Amino acid sequence: MKTYPFDDRAIAWRTIDGFDHASYAILSVDEHARIVDLLLKFAANERVALHRHGADYRTLVLQGELRIYRPDGTLKEVRPVGSYVAGRAGGEPHTEGGGDQDAIVYFTNRNIDGPIYEILDEDHTVVATFGLPEFQALYNAQAEAVA
């Protein structure tokens, strides 16, 4: 489904080496309230690394469609533009990515108590984690790059 593009020209998208097919813009990190808000851009017809959510989250698809895949690669769900989802920590590991155009999705992670995301290898072994300290460091580096 073709959607109108979200005007992201004012967003300074950033990437993390080794995490292909996605870029991010952190909107805020509130360590006291245990909330991280960010935008993620998923490349069209690509998938990010296998991962699990370690915090409650809310998503709103702003552009394109977000495709969710099971660990075996089968398509689990398609969230079209405008879709709002509230999810709980845990759940099945998955990959996700854009549909036929880049997907831009607003994520808010809440009730953070440990890793927000656990990045997994093909055996579901945790190979990296991103929690409040990592997001605060990324947010600080993002702010320095803009200054």
Image (cartoon, rainbow, N blue to C red):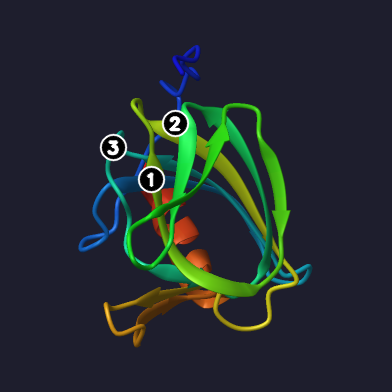
Does 15 appear above or below 80? below
Q: Give the amino acid type for the residue marked by disc 1 in the picture.
A: Gly
Image disc number at residue 11: 2
Residue depicted at x 68% and y 74%: 112
Secondary structure beneath disc 2?
loop
Q: Give the amino acid type for the residue marked by disc 3 in the picture.
A: Asn
- Give left or right: position of 10 versus 145: right
Q: Mark 2 or 1 closer to N-term?
A: 2
Give the image quarter of residue 34.
bottom right
Give the image quarter of residue 53.
bottom right
Q: CA distance from mark 2 to mark 1?
A: 19 Å
Image disc number at residue 97: 1
Quarter the C terminus occupies: top left
Q: Nearer the viewer, residue 9 or 82?
A: 82
Q: Nearer the viewer, residue 67 or 119?
A: 67
Q: Give the amino acid type for the residue marked by disc 2 in the picture.
A: Ile
Q: CA distance from mark 1 to mark 3?
A: 7 Å
Q: Nearer the viewer, residue 24 or 67?
A: 67
Q: Mark 1 or 3 closer to N-term?
A: 3
Does 54 appear above or below 144? below
Number of numbered discs overlaid on the protein picture? 3
Labelled pair 2, 1 in contact (Cβ < 8 Å): no
Secondary structure beneath disc 3?
loop
Q: Residues within 10 Å of mark 2 (few under 14, many from 20)?
A: few
Can residue 53 be seen in this snapshot?
A: no
Q: Position of residue 16 (x, y in %)?
A: 29, 58
Residue depicted at x 42% and y 47%: 24
Image disc number at residue 45: 3
Labelled pair 1, 3 in contact (Cβ < 8 Å): yes
Image disc number at residue 79: none
- Give left or right: position of 110 versus 66: right
Secondary structure beneath disc 1?
strand
